[in-house]
Image (cartoon, grey):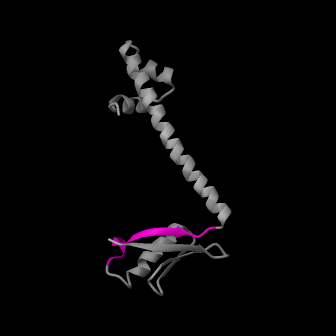
Amino acid sequence: MADHKVVYRRRPKGEWVASVEGVRRCQGRGRTLRLARQQLRIALARVVEDPYQMDFVEDVRLPPPARQLILRHWAARRRLGKEQARADEAARAALHALLGLDVSVKDAGDLLGLPPLKLQKLRARKRA
């Protein structure tokens, strides 16, 4: 299945316009990106058999400062995910050590500062 590049542009009054490169006279418009995407699929239904089978590679055109801030945000989220995985592994090891000392799960949760549901998930997960 081929990828189709979709370009989103924001009009001065705040409306988003979405268009597929290589498909003429087929646009979606909306107050939000999501609505513009939906309207684009509806417009594509007039041109192709099943627009929901098309994979989109989306290019949202924004001013460079805004684009840079979004890229920084996503990089920080990736780092956070890695750190969260390390914290979960440390908590899992500490939980198993506490349970080995006959500390109750409730007390282990208090010591680790974790809610019961998180403890259950950590307890059930095997070492990576």
Residue 60 belongs to magenta span = yes
Q: Residue at x 53, y 77 (%)?
A: 29
**Residue 126 vertical placement versus 44 (above, below):** above
Left or right: residue 28 compared with residue 62: left
* Horizontal and vertical percent position of residue 19: 50, 78
Q: Quadrant of the N terminus?
A: bottom left
Tally of numbered discs: 0
**Quarter assignment of residue 23:** bottom left
In the foreground, 16 or 9: 9
**Residue 102: percent from the left, percent from the top?**
37, 12
Say which of 108 and 106 sits in front.
Answer: 108
- Residue at 45% over, 27% down: 91
> Who's the residue at 50% across and 70% down the image?
35
Task: Pinpoint residue 105: horizontal percent, then vertical percent.
Answer: 40, 21
Viewer-proximal residue among 119 and 61: 61
Q: Is residue 69 left or right of residue 109?
A: right
Q: Is residue 15 above or below residue 64?
A: below
**Residue 63: horizontal and vertical position, in percent?**
66, 67
Q: Residue furthest top?
A: 101
In the displayed structure image, the side of residue 2 where residue 81 appears, left or right: right
Q: Is residue 121 above or below residue 51?
A: above
Range of residues picked out in magenta:
50-62
Q: Nearer the viewer, residue 81 or 49?
A: 81
| Residue 8 sits inside the magenta stretch | no
- Quadrant housing the C terminus: top left
